[in-house]
Amino acid sequence: MSGAPGDEIIGIKSRDAAEGKRGWRLRPRGVFRAVVIGVPYLWLVALFLVPFLIVVKISLSQVVVAMPPYQPTFGDVASWWAGLKQLSLENYRWIAGDDLYFDAYVLSLAIAAGATLLTLLIAYPLAYGIAKASPAWRTTLVMLVILPFWTSFLIRVYAWIAILKPEGLFNQLLLFLGVIDQPLVILNTPVAIFIGIVYSYLPFMTLPIYASLERMDHSLTEAAADLGSPPLKSFWTITFPLSLPGVVAGCFLVFIPATGEFVIPDLLGGSRTLMIGKTVWLEFFTNRDWPVASAVAVVLVALLVVPIALFQRQQARAG
Amino acid sequence: MKSLGSIRSDFAPWLDKSAVPFIRFEGVTKRFGSFEAVDDLSLSIYEGEFFALLGASGCGKSTLLRMLAGFEAPSEGRIILDGEDLAGIPPYRRPVNMMFQSYALFPHMSVAKNIAFGLKQEGMAKADIAERVEQVLKLVKLEDYAKRKPDQLSGGQRQRVALARSLAKRPKVLLLDEPLGALDKKLREETQFELADLQNQLGTTFIMVTHDQEEAMTLACRIAVMDKGQILQVATPTEIYEAPNSRFVADFVGNVNVFEGTVRSVNGECITIETTAGLDIAAKSEAPVTAGDNVAYVLRPEKLKIAVEPIGGPNVMEGEVWDIAYFGPVTSFHIRLDNGMIVKVAMVNATREGPLQLTWHDRVFVQFDEDAGLVMTV
């Protein structure tokens, strides 16, 4: 067999192979490219797409008292066709028919949106302050923003219980200062969830905004001033619009995980505030209804895919 | 004063004793911590002038410009513009506009919006803004680019937009911070002439900061040479080049040969200098000197003549061609004199063959007249 058809198979045109040297150079580079791109794709397929498809499949199954607690299981190849016919949208109909799920979705989205806005209002001035600090200070200040990550997320949320409970540090401080004479009920209310989310996700909002403000050319605001614009007006016409990519990135980095947040509402929000993360947990562990839990999770993913798609489009446009 | 050079201009308000300066720096000092960027500096600039602040980086020229724009406040002294003390007036209320070195175009706005930005701040009517934008775009020949964003323009086009934006408000003074610094050589030469024409046409006072002596010489009516926060000389380009008041200015603007020595005899204007290298130089001195004074004779390379045969006249020296640099219009020779000193000689290539067919290690004669150089007291 001649060399040309073999070369065709590994993606090199025979014309290049005939030129010898050039063919040699192209081949390792092509392989290198494929490896570099292939590894992260394989990673995503193995650790995101496959598990997600398994969850989708479970969401289309029926609950049974067995191990695993659903069927069909597709254990052997022979029963695949019969198993496929058993899959149905029954669990999705169930979710649509019960207000509990609808309310949990709406509440989760509302809390996530509100908390995102609050985080933005706190993070923007913070990021602005850091970006305007002297270069020597900037590194230290950015370190301080990242510092909480050195402690476990769970421990930090637990610490808030000690701060917010009726006999906790916050109430004791207010009582000591004479601001209040009865302890405030904060723990186990939506207020505590907001505090928890804003606290936990602040770095995710601060860092992208800081990044966009820090790389902004200082002479732009000087030029605005030079052309007759007072500082506050320059902020709204120049600085803020140019930091929007950072603001959008930060908002999605907070909003998306906050919507499905489980730990914070569970530990700080009490039993009356039922967010969607908690709903999945209850279906899964208390009711042992894996199919409904999976369906709830799939719907959540679908709800969040829309903002993610918007985010990616915005990023693509900015790049 | 003796008239120098070949460029005549009727515009010279600085020679008119009754003329009132448009901008006055009075004893201005600016300190950043313990560093004095500008040191007790006084300067007058007249209306309609194209003024250049020339100096190496860190000499304080940009600080001076930024104080005029209002981005820095003087530590001491006053800045007066058109009779008004600028102290305490924020940049957004000053009747000056600046063209930034980085151009500082707003990346999220189109060319037209960039130019309209300053006019909007004035509260100008929309129709008037549109008209003015069109007008300045025409001025910089960018009518077709109004809708483009800055990142869709070439470097030269961005430079024009920056210029148009700073001119749109019709400022009393236009400040230019290294206006041509980011352009390549060819484009810079073209733009120099356009900028000079524009200033002529508008009559606006332009103040330019530059480290490029050629740029300052081509554009400016007067140049202030700065070093270490102080002004060393303020004069027209010809005076700066032909009659520098110090060795620093002579050395900073153009090339020089410096012969150091002592005055041996004085006969009216004519003096003899005995140089430390053991040469005798016959020179004419404008400055009064007496025998025994330590002086430097400063000589531009193009004021020397070079010959292969022995030549007459004063100050003939013999040497060897040490180095040749061919620039096209001129050729620069380094001649090693027999006493070991290296002299720079520039020759115009008036013919295609070049005036002399010289090569490395040729024996040559170098000659210059008594008034070719400048006697400077040390």
Image (cartoon, coloured by chain):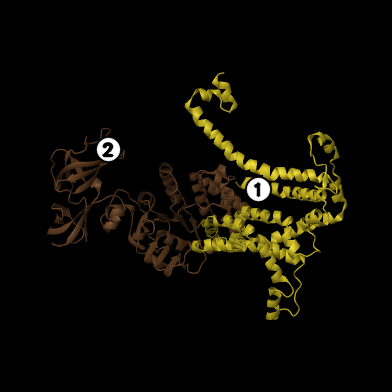
Chain colours: A yellow, B brown
Residue that carries the numbered disc 1 in the rendered image:
A314
Residue name at image x 58 percent, y 53 percent: B116
Residue B222 location, quadrant: bottom left
Residue B102 appears at what percent x and percent y? 48, 52
Residue B50 location, quadrant: bottom left
Residue that carries the numbered disc 2 in the rendered image:
B349
In the image: residue B345, left or right of residue B90? left
Residue B244 appears at what percent x and percent y? 28, 56
Q: Which residue is more in the foreground, A220 or B245?
A: A220
Residue name at image x 73 percent, y 50 percent: A304
Badges 1 and 2: C-beta atoms under 8 Å apart? no
State which chain disc 1 sits on: A
Residue B68 appears at what percent x and percent y? 45, 62
| Disc 1 residue type (three-letter) | Gln
| Disc 2 residue type (three-letter) | Asn
Residue name at image x 58 percent, y 44 percent: B148
Residue A167 appears at what percent x and percent y? 73, 75
Which element type, helix, strand or loop, lies under badge 2? loop
Labels 1, 2: front one = 1
State which chain disc 2 sits on: B
In the image: residue B307, left or right of residue B170? left
Residue B296 location, quadrant: bottom left
